[in-house]
Amino acid sequence: MRNALDILEERGFLYQLTDAVGLKKRLGEESMTFYVGFDPTGNSLHIGHLLPVMAMRWLQQCGHRAIALVGGGTAMVGDPSGKTEARPILTAGEIDANAEAIKGQLSRFLDFSNDRAELVNNADWLRDLNYIEFLRDVGCHFSINRMLAAESVKMRLETGISFLEFNYMLLQSYDFYVLKRDHGCDIQFGGQDQWGNIVAGCDLVRRMLGQESFGATFPLLLKGDGQKFGKTASGAVWLDIQRTSPFDYYQFWRNVDDADVDRLLGFFTALPMDEVHRLGALPAPAINRAKEILGFEATLLAHGFEEATRAYLAAGGEFGFADPDGKIATSSRVTEVKTTQVNSDLPTLTVPKDELAEGIWVVKLFIDSGLAKSNGEVRRLIKGGGCYLNDGRIADDKLNVTLDDLRDGQLMIRSGKKNRRRVVAE
């Protein structure tokens, strides 16, 4: 089996490591336990959380044990990282409810059977801490000068940071210490804005336990235009289907920028990297097939095969499929879905096979199907670019449609964006 660090590096997951050589050696020699933290400030994870979740999947598939830490304790303080102002403070009841919802979502991506992964809540050891004892036993290991130099703190010094938030580094470091002491956790992963906290955690483990530990960060995920990834005009894209439907989830991935496709396929699918690079390098309009694959695979992971299939077919039925004939090779499970399924409920026109063999005037076909009422209407639609055959725009009103136009025993005609008819030959 390949070394997990090689896989993460190849797919672009790694930004900084405390000891790359030592970590790679250990990952190649034994099963290691690692953790990633999630603050339950809402009742759902969103796409911005998925980069570490996908990295956890790869590490787990390479035989390493995952700990997903839900920050029921740290959420009562609020992480200042990446924020220009303090996060709202939630009640313990709100935090606990959010933590339970997040646990269910993580289980879609990680295997929690046979002790391969564990869910822990740092509220179990943080909420009952004795403040004086904590300062004496833990706080003595932290230098104020070093804490002020941390990126997460420096950014907030300009707008103001409360003493409550300033404590966050101590608490996150203490999490790593507890997980190392009680769960044998050797590695902490987090976003690149967590680097200062992660390094501080490794240092605390060394000082309090005299043991080696490792830290690594993931790159900040931005779109090609520099904007934050996972945001739309209507807000964040959530894993909770009550907040973002599987169709809208699929469409988010389907509509990413061409320049981002290669990178996102590497992060958010399990496709081999040679296939990722091949798909990501497709020219327009073929690159749209790569986006369909990205959308299907991402929705498959988050919502399952049936929901991914429904979303793919619904989007294709409304906007057309990028590769209806399957000419672009892929190992994606999207190939298991027949695009003819989308048309099962569409109005259908049956024409004699021998008549189609001779050729049927496209204008007549549109009228017979009910998409238009007169020859003049069809001609005007064609002239205005509003008539389609198998999702290809019709430019010639003298076109004859023949058996060669059939796809899987049928052909599709469309007027405008949504008025579609299926045509079958018998």
Image (cartoon, rainbow, N blue to C red):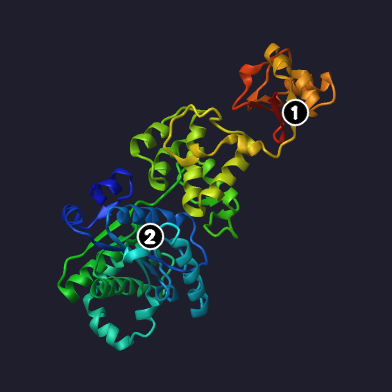
Amino acid type for the residue under numbered disc 1: Leu
Where does the image place residue 323, in percent across and percent down from the top left?
53, 30
Mark 2 residue type: Asp
* Residue depicted at x 30% and y 49%: 8
Counting other residues with Cα less than 10 Å from the Cα at mark 1, is it few (<14), some (14-19), or many (20 or more)?
some
From the viewer's perspective, is residue 120 above or below residue 60?
A: below
359 up-or-down from 224: above or below: above
Rendered residue at 39%/78% (across/down): 123
Residue 229 visible in the picture: no
Q: Which numbered marker is on residue 349?
A: 1
Residue pointed to by mark 2: 111
Number of residue marks? 2
Quadrant assignment for the C terminus? top right
Query: Residue 137, percent across and down?
Result: 23, 83
The relative height of residue 349 versus residue 17 in the rendered view (above or below) is above
Q: Is residue 257 above or below residue 372?
A: below
Describe residue 157's horizontal placement relative to residue 340 as left or right.
left
The disc, 2 or 1, on the residue closer to the chain's N-terminal end is: 2
Camera-nearest residue between 89 and 188: 188
- Nearer-the-camera pick, 245 or 195: 245
Q: Secondary structure at mark 2?
A: loop
Where does residue 259 sit, x and y in percent of width and height?
Answer: 45, 36
Residue 236 visible at all: yes
Tell me the quarter of the picture where residue 243 sits. Answer: bottom right
> Mark 2 or 1, which is nearer the eye?
1
